[in-house]
Image (cartoon, grey):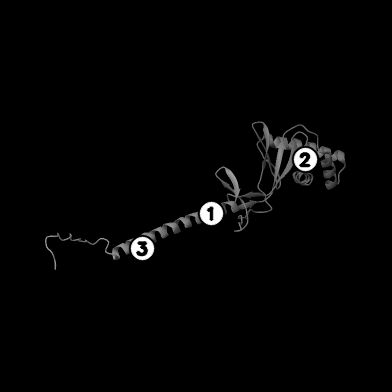
């Protein structure tokens, strides 16, 4: 019976069992885990709510068709299965639904524990950034794109380059001035004799 209920739940997406509760399958999408550089596969998760609901009408038809039994006998089998299942849960046993998980009871509450049963495994995925393509970048608390950031970087590099050119030109001019000054004996001692006094006459 567990296998038939599991098969019905997978095909129908939900299943109500009187005296136990309602099962629903939720399918999650694939997740791009940027931190681990992986794409996690889609999953199927069974959610369970313990409540006093009626049997799913399609469930009775499905089990009747699978077992080749009339609806009234199928109903009796379901009631018997529910009674046995509740007794197992009270005694601390788990009730397994193949490939989905286990029904357990703790502190007078019924829970469903999903089990890992992935059809696919995580795959490695790294974001590819082309040099000339624009992509969003967070700078401080402002969002911009890579094109603007590259423009800022190149603009700063160009201004720094111009500053160094101007400094080198000034340095070269200064060196030339000093060389010219040294070559013209700029630091030599120059003696300028005084003019002879007019105490004699030269004939």
Mark 2, residue position: 15
Point 81% across, 39% down: residue: 77
Q: Earlier in the sequence, mark 1 or mark 2?
A: 2
Q: Name the image quarter holding residue 91.
A: top right
Residue 139, x across and y down, in percent: 56, 46
Q: Please tell me in which quadrant of the rendered image residue 51 appears.
A: top right
Q: CA distance from mark 2 to mark 3?
A: 95 Å
Q: Nearer the viewer, mark 2 or mark 3?
A: 3
How far apart, in angstroms, are the residues tagged by discs 1 and 2?
A: 65 Å
Residue 153, position as x, y percentages in the image: 53, 53
Tell me whether the residue at label 2 lies in contact with that at label 3, contact meaning CB atoms closer than 8 angstroms.
Answer: no
Give the answer, above or below, for where 70 lies relative to 133: above
Q: Are marks 1 and 2 in contact (CB under 8 Å)?
A: no
Q: Is residue 7 left or right of residue 129?
A: right
Give the residue drawn at x 36%, y 59%.
174
Secondary structure at numbered mark 2: strand
Residue density around tag 3, few if under 14, some if 14–19, many if 20 or more, within 10 Å: few
Q: Secondary structure at mark 1?
A: helix
Give residue 24's position: percent from left, percent from top: 74, 40
Q: Could you say which disc has been placed on residue 32 in the image? A: none
Residue 152 relative to residue 176: left or right: right
Q: Nearer the viewer, residue 42 or 138?
A: 138
Q: Which mark is residue 176?
A: 3
State whether residue 189 is above or below residue 52. Answer: below
**In this rendering, would 198 be left or right of 30?**
left
Q: Residues within 10 Å of mark 2 (few under 14, many from 20)?
A: many
Q: Position of residue 129 (x, y in %)?
A: 60, 56
Foreground pick, 198 / 137: 198
Furthest residue to the bottom? 203
In the orientation shown, which residue stands out farthest toward the left? 200
Mark 1 or 3, which is nearer the eye?
A: 3
Determine which residue is flagged by label 1: 155
């Amino acid at each position: 019976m567990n296998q038939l209920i599991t098969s019905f739940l997978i095909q129908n997406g939900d299943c109500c069992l009187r005296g136990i509760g309602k099962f629903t399958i939720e399918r999650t999408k694939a997740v791009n885990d940027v931190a681990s550089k992986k794409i996690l596969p889609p999953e199927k998760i069974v959610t369970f709510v313990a409540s006093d609901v009626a049997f799913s009408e399609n469930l009775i038809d499905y089990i009747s068709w699978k077992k080749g039994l009339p609806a009234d006998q199928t109903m009796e089998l379901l009631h018997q299965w529910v009674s046995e299942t509740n007794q197992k849960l009270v005694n601390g046993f788990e009730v397994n639904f193949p490939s989905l998980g286990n029904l357990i009871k703790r502190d007078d509450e019924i829970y469903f524990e999903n089990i890992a049963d992935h059809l696919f495994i995580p795959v490695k995925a790294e974001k590819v950034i082309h040099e000339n393509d624009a992509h969003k970048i967070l700078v401080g608390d402002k969002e911009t794109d890579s094109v603007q950031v590259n423009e800022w970087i190149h603009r700063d590099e160009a201004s720094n380059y111009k500053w160094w050119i101007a400094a080198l030109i000034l340095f070269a001019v200064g060196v030339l001035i000093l060389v010219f000054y040294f070559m013209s004996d700029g630091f030599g001692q120059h003696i300028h004799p005084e003019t002879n006094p007019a105490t004699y006459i030269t004939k």
